[in-house]
Amino acid sequence: MNEDYLSKDTIIAPISGLSGGSVHLIRISGTKAVEITSRFFSNSRFSRAEKNRFFYGQLVNEQNEPLDDVIVLLYRKPHSYTGEDVVEISCHGNILITEQIIELYLRQGCRLAQPGEFTKRAFMNGRIDLVQAESIASLISARSEKALKNAIQQLEGKFSLEIKEIKQDLIQSISLLELNLDFAEEDIEVIEDQQVLKLIDKIMNKIERYLNSYQQGKLLLNGVQVLITGKPNVGKSSLMNALLEKDRVLVSDIPGTTRDFVHDEIYLENVLVKFIDTAGIRISDDKLEKEGIKRAEKLFSDVDLILFLFDASQPLDDEDFYLIKKLKDFKEKVIFVGNKIDLNFLEENKQYLGERPLLKISAKNRTNIESIKNQIKKIIQKTDTQQVIISNERQYGLLKKAREELKRAKNTLTQKTGHEFVAMELREVVDLLSEITGEITNEDILNNIFANFCIGK
Ligand code: GDP
Ligand code: ZN
């Protein structure tokens, strides 16, 4: 498919942010990029150049009026980002200059690049595979240093390489299985079932590891979400301020008003941590608001950690119990936080809390706030950037299907239904893996992926 891809249009877009910055960068990619530039660029050595180089000179318009002194970077195909001839113009960081240059190229027959179109062309021209293309999107949206490292690793092709190795293993066994079929009448086994089983197990282990990394990958990419919940007046806002190390009071709770959750962010160990306060929803009211409960429960399942806050100086009451019951289903990520220990800590409350961790704090005096941060750090430290980490939903979905197909192949093999069926199922796995890297794909999937990029990527 890659060879057939001929892009008719020469496309242009600014590739640096247009606000601020002393220099703006504009990229032009396609067959007309060099020709148009040579007509309006004063440096005559430019159009004769065959190697990747940069040139200094003046850019003018059709009336020979100067637009700007620029540096033009020339990338001859296929040694460019897109694999086509690429010209990048570095001009002064003024939006008017950038616009005038882009308009010149538009008048000369270029068109504006769509979001992700440069990267799409790079993929179509075989410069990068789909995993690498998607890692470029992750690179841009990464909210932590580890996520960034992971995206760079994927861009370098580590995951793609591992997928390729798995595919080679599979193809090898498929051809041996098929050879078996040819020799079946002569009763010669070219490959033992045992060998195939071993291989399937090995591959399943690898895929299982990728699948397990998904939670971590998402966490690194989007940050850790921590929910602070508890009945009114237990100190949620105070705790939020303490965690954020701010003095201002973020909210004054007005019962009954529906408004969005209050949230704010900090970085812990270079990972973004988002705190969400359920202040805006009334989940412990008498007139239990259905909508509020629904929203809260959605949050309970979405977040990575739930801090259930209660007033440790008072006996727990029905409002507390109501929430504790609601949180039962999310037990493994709940931490109980007894607040206001400067007033008192009632031991009797402990019996209702089960075996989850219990922290004792005073939000007002900022006592023991570190203990909460340590719990969050525990979640972050589980991530291991030495291994490939999956953070992409599409890739995750395909890996899940591959695992199912492998399970099926294993069953077929142990039930001795026939090697041809095992081979067929393993072929299915190969196809799924090829979809991950983009050797097998379709236009809809591609458009969907690249539409999520921003202009200029
Ligand atoms: P929220 O409704 O859960 O957000 O609770 P707030 O943070 O608005 O606090 C309710 C009241 O409890 C305020 O008067 C706070 O000053 C007080 N408060 C919060 N944390 C503590 C604490 O650790 N000790 C004491 N003594 N009072 C606190
Ligand atoms: Zn509050």
Image (spheres, grey):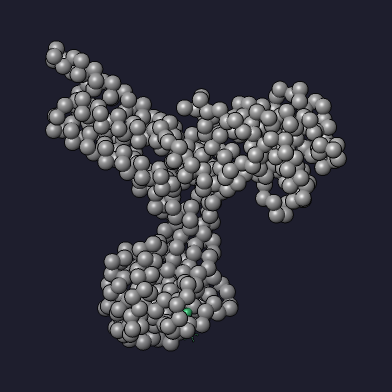
The residue located at (30%, 78%) in the rendering is 322
**Image quadrant assignment for residue 108:** top right
User: In the rendered view of the protein, which quadrant contains the C terminus?
Assistant: top right
In the rendering, at what x and y percent does residue 254 appear? Answer: 47, 84
Vertical position of residue 166 compared to residue 234: above or below: above
Task: Please indicate whether residue 383 sits to the left or right of residue 123 in the image.
Answer: left
One can see residue 336 in this view: no
Task: Please indicate whether residue 312 sits to the left or right of residue 39 in the image.
Answer: left
Nearest the viewer among 379 and 35 is 35
In the rendering, at what x and y percent does residue 420 appear? Answer: 21, 25
The residue located at (56%, 28%) in the rendering is 6
In the rendering, at what x and y percent does residue 81 appear? Answer: 61, 34
Furthest residue in direction top, as rendered: 186
One can see residue 180 in this view: yes
Task: Please indicate whether residue 107 sits to the left or right of residue 283 in the image.
Answer: right
In the rendering, at what x and y percent does residue 178 appear? Answer: 24, 20
Nearest the viewer among 166 and 42 is 42
The residue located at (16%, 16%) in the rendering is 184
